[in-house]
């Protein structure tokens, strides 16, 4: 029952990418290609775009764009694809991350991402590799599961422990409604604060796809790949990924950490990125596309400084 994906913060993202006609651009999260199509509209004949997605179904959606000689699609994880571009010696003028899931993925019960439709507990963006949500939930130790729920889903600690114990008690879990029912049994139904299953499903998905590890490695690659003046734009959808992007940029802003009594900087502060805009979707965007409600766009500009040592 795929319904299509409406790109989030499309105009804001394109503005922050500051595209020039001959730019080489990377759309690290192709999805349904909404941002990619718009980027190609902005580029001239000398520009080019690489779209990346680890979901095998995204490759099919990208096939229509392959007639455009400026477009190339890479099927795989964005951290690996970006590091390959670095190793090939390429230099990008702009990189976009529109993180999380596409509506194609959420609206397809067989993928197991939705807590409102029954389907197998899979949740892998690339179902050809890695461990499914069911395999993870049926083998993880309760303490580790509680940590995953509170760290990746912001589930309050006491609630995370109750949910983890209930999941372990109900094993084996096979379908999404098994997980949903475990959450309901552990924490009941809350009038306020949203459906508690939402955060639990998010946490499991983030863990199963190693979303934060992949993003960290991808940002390190982006630091190397962007040419001086290159633009990094990331649209995040939950606090874990937003914190990661925010910290990545602020750690590279090269703020001087010398004691204030020193007359000149001796700490060697060298900004690798300059912070750009931070934006939220407009009330109208949220009304037209409720899935954009938690989005936050962060932009940064690469300076000419060499990458940091840990990059
Ligand atoms: C929110 S959607 C992108 C939507 C897209 N901007 C559009 O307008 O259609 C995020 C996409 O990123 C992909 N994705 C998430 N993490 C990824 C990763 N580590 N490597 C490659 N693709 C990833 C997902 O499979 C999904 O298709």
Image (tube, grey):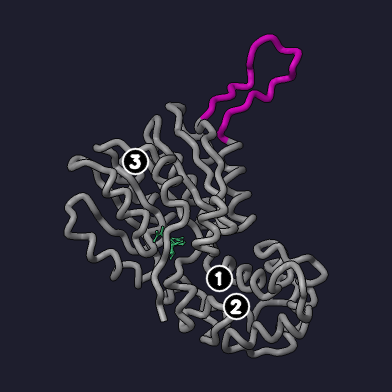
Q: Is mark 2 within 8 Å of ligand 1?
A: no
Q: Is residue 195 above or below residue 236?
A: below
- Sort mark 1 into few (<14), some (14-19) or many (20+) by Cα contacts within 10 Å: many
Instruction: Label 1: state its secondary structure.
Output: helix
Residue 106 position, x and y percent, is: 49, 73
| Disc 1 + disc 3, Cβ < 8 Å | no
In this view, the mark in front (3 or 2): 3
Name which of mark 3 and mark 2 comes first in the sequence. 3
Residue 194 or 168: which is nearer the viewer? Answer: 194
Q: How would you classify the magenta stretch by its main secondary structure?
A: loop
Q: Was residue 110 drawn as part of the magenta stretch in this picture?
A: no
Q: Residue furthest right?
A: 158
In the displayed structure image, the side of residue 258 where residue 114 appears, left or right:
left
Q: Which quadrant, please, contains the N terminus?
A: bottom left
Residue 80 position, x and y percent, is: 40, 56
Measured in 3D between alpha carbons, the distance from the residue under mark 1 to the one under mark 3, in whole angstroms, is 30 Å
Q: Is residue 101 visible?
A: yes
What is the span of residues highlighted in magenta in the rendered image? 252-271
The residue that label 2 is drawn on is 136
| Disc 1 + disc 2, Cβ < 8 Å | yes
The residue depicted at 35 percent of the width and 72 percent of the height is 57
Q: Was residue 262 drawn as part of the magenta stretch in this picture?
A: yes
Report which quarter residue 198 is drawn in: bottom right
Q: Is residue 212 visible?
A: no
Instruction: Label 3: state its secondary structure.
Output: strand
- Sort mark 2 into few (<14), some (14-19) or many (20+) by Cα contacts within 10 Å: some
Measured in 3D between alpha carbons, the distance from the residue under mark 3 to the one under mark 2, in whole angstroms, is 37 Å
Residue 107 position, x and y percent, is: 47, 76
Q: Is mark 3 within 8 Å of ligand 1?
A: no
Q: Is residue 137 above or below residue 15?
A: below
The residue that label 3 is drawn on is 92
The residue that label 1 is drawn on is 208
């Amino acid at each position: 029952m795929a319904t299509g994906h409406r790109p989030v913060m499309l105009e804001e993202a394109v503005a922050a990418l500051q595209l020039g006609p001959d730019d080489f651009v990377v759309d690290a999260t192709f999805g349904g290609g909404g941002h990619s199509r718009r980027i190609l509209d902005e580029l001239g004949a000398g520009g080019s775009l690489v779209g990346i997605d680890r979901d095998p179904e995204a490759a099919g959606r990208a096939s229509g764009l392959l007639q455009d000689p400026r477009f190339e699609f890479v099927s795989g994880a964005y951290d690996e694809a970006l590091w390959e571009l670095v190793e090939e010696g390429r230099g990008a003028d702009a990189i976009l991350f529109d993180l999380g899931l596409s509506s194609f993925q959420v609206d397809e019960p067989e993928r197991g991402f939705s807590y409102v439709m029954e389907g197998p507990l899979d949740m892998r963006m690339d179902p050809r590799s890695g461990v499914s949500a069911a395999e993870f939930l049926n083998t993880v130790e309760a303490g580790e599961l509680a940590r995953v729920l509170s760290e990746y889903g912001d589930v309050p600690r006491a609630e995370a422990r109750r949910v983890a114990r209930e999941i372990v008690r109900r094993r084996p879990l096979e379908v999404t409604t098994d997980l949903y029912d475990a959450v309901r049994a552990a924490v009941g139904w809350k009038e306020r604060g949203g459906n508690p299953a939402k955060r639990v499903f998010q946490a499991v998905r983030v863990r199963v796809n190693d979303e934060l590890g992949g993003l960290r490695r991808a940002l390190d690659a982006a630091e190397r790949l962007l040419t001086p003046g290159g633009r990094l734009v990331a649209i995040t959808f939950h606090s874990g990924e937003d914190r990661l992007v925010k910290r990545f940029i602020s750690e590279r802003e090269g703020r001087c950490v010398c004691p204030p009594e020193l007359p000149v900087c001796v700490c060697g502060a060298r900004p690798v990125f300059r912070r750009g805009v931070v934006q939220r979707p407009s009330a109208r965007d949220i009304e037209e596309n409720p899935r954009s409600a938690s989005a936050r766009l962060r932009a940064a500009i690469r300076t000419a400084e060499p990458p940091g040592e840990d990059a």
